[in-house]
Image: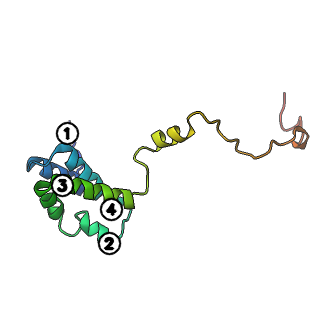
Amino acid sequence: MVAMQEMLFEWDEWKERAVALGVAEDLAELGKNLMRDAYMQRWPEIVLSECGWDDDGFGMLAMARAKPAETRRHWERLYAQYHRRPSCPLASSQATTRGKALAPLHSSPRPSDSVPPRSSARYPE
């Protein structure tokens, strides 16, 4: 049986390199997610360059190693400005609808007499 190697993307390799060079695991994860989402969500070109796409992530790595707290704030600001999806769609939708009844699909119920009667030829009993 042949063992399959897990497919790694650029952002996964960046995270591994960052952790190996001493970047905190959570900051490396944030950098990986930033790099991935900037690409997958087609952020503006200027932002892509800040997210490692022009230099294979070396600038991000240097920032994370030199000034981790400032880097975290900067990356979180980029996320706040450009990220298009909530971090967990289910959690955010449940939080907003908690305690509220779901809205009906139709604004007004259809009267029962507007439904055509079944033909016995089409629906044998």
Give whichever of discs 2 and 3 has the lower sequence position.
3
> Which image quarter holds the N terminus?
top left
- List x then y, in percent, for residue 85: 43, 53
Q: Which residue is mark 2?
A: 45
Mark 1, Cα crowd under 10 Å, few <14 / some 14-19 / many 20+, is few
C-alpha span from label 3 to label 4: 14 Å
Q: Is residue 101 left or right of residue 33?
A: right
Q: Amino acid at mark 3?
A: Trp
Give whichever of discs 1 and 4 has the lower sequence position.
1
Q: Is residue 10 left or right of residue 47?
A: left
Give whichever of discs 2 and 4 has the lower sequence position.
4
**Residue sitting at 55 percent across and 35 percent down?**
98
- List x then y, in percent, for residue 94: 52, 38
Q: Which mark is residue 14?
A: 3
C-alpha span from label 1 to label 2: 41 Å
Q: Which residue is mark 4?
A: 39
Q: Which residue is mark 1?
A: 2
Give whichever of discs 3 and 1 has the lower sequence position.
1
C-alpha span from label 1 to label 4: 32 Å
Q: Amino acid at mark 2?
A: Glu
